[in-house]
Amino acid sequence: MGFNLFNFLSQDIAIDLGTANTLIHVKGKGLLLNEASVIAVRQADHQIVAVGNAARTMWGKTPEGILTVRPMKDGVIADFELAELMIKRFIKQLQLRQWMHPRMAISIPSGITEVERRAVRDSGEHAGARQVYLVEEPMAAAIGVGLPVDEPIGSMVVDIGGGTTEIGVTALSGLVTKISIRIGGDEMNDAVVQHFKKRHSLLLGDLQAEQIKMDIGSAYPYKSDKTMSVRGRDLISGIPQTVEATAKEIQEALEEPVLAIVEAVRLALEKTPPELSADILERGIIMTGGGSLLRGIDVRLRQETQVPVSLAEDPLTAVVRGVGLVLDDIDRYQKILNLRLRR
């Protein structure tokens, strides 16, 4: 009775703590927050200036004394103190009426170390959770898109996030095959930055590179004759400069990270037991995450693997929806939980 009362008096929270974005789902209320994983603080006293999307707009534009930071890198916590401050502020923004400390479920990359798992768990605990559950991202994505993870059927999901690409084959409430590579949207952005340095001697900011990727970026064999005016700082003269970029050259710039993702998917298919491979060939691969929105990447995977590939509905929220479903029915998903922490 006491345990049920605790659950009744608290609003449980599911978090997709991503490199690029943090999404929060509250039990009974749905998705309430989708903000950039960015925090701006004063260096002198570490007072928060802004978090989320507001902090992201300040990126690269802050005066001396204000630091804009992404506390997550490659899907894991790079700055524990700032990550904790960011999570607390996000939860505060929700303005939840909590009578008890909530239970909290947080998604994690499948390839992180025990130390990195501990950092995520501690962040949840310090943010006020009475219980912390960790859910691996491939499993969360699979649950979020409605795949039958608890049945003896092979299902494959490819989640391309900001810092990692998570590939998992699920069956009987487990990840039979899982591959995690630290390549995602950030590496694509960096590839665009490096391309303009080498070909045009032009220095771009990260946010501008991301916009170029979104506007005219693609994966082979997508074809387009689009062009885009790109402004940056000339590395030779040091003055602002504008160049015209084509969709084809951005596609070439993105080839290295795209190829790494393709190779990881091929490796996952090779490591999958033949009984489950037959299920995947019949049911196809489901793509989730913001990186899966890159034009033509689903077609590229389909051509390279000869397996049907489809994009999930609302791929950006698939992981947090899955974590939320786990939190809604802990008993059903007990087998897939990595860790449960009692306060």
Image: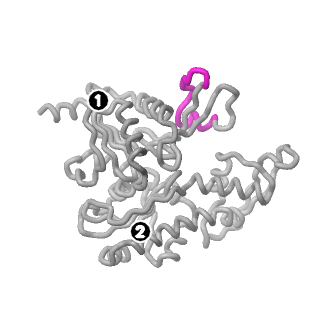
Q: Secondary structure at mark 2?
A: strand
| Colouring of the image | one colour
Q: Residue at x 61, y 57 (%)?
A: 188
What is the crowding at mark 2: few (fewer than 14 residues within 10 Å), some, or many (at least 20)? many
Is 48 within the magenta? yes
Q: Nearer the viewer, residue 219 or 223?
A: 219
Q: Real-space Cα distance between discs 1 and 2?
A: 38 Å
Q: Looking at the picture, how far across and down is residue 233, in whole percent?
A: 80, 46
Residue 158 shown left or right of residue 255 in the figure: left
Give the residues drawn in magenta, as a range: 43-58
- Do the residues under discs 1 and 2 have CB atoms within 8 angstroms? no
- Residue 229: assigned label: none
Q: Nearer the viewer, residue 294 or 173?
A: 173
Q: Residue at x 61, y 21 (%)?
A: 44
- Residue 285: assigned label: 2
Q: Looking at the picture, how far across and down is residue 237, in whole percent?
A: 88, 46
Q: Which residue is mark 1?
A: 101
Is 38 within the magenta? no
The answer to which image quadrant residue 1 occupies is top left
What is the crowding at mark 1: few (fewer than 14 residues within 10 Å), some, or many (at least 20)? some
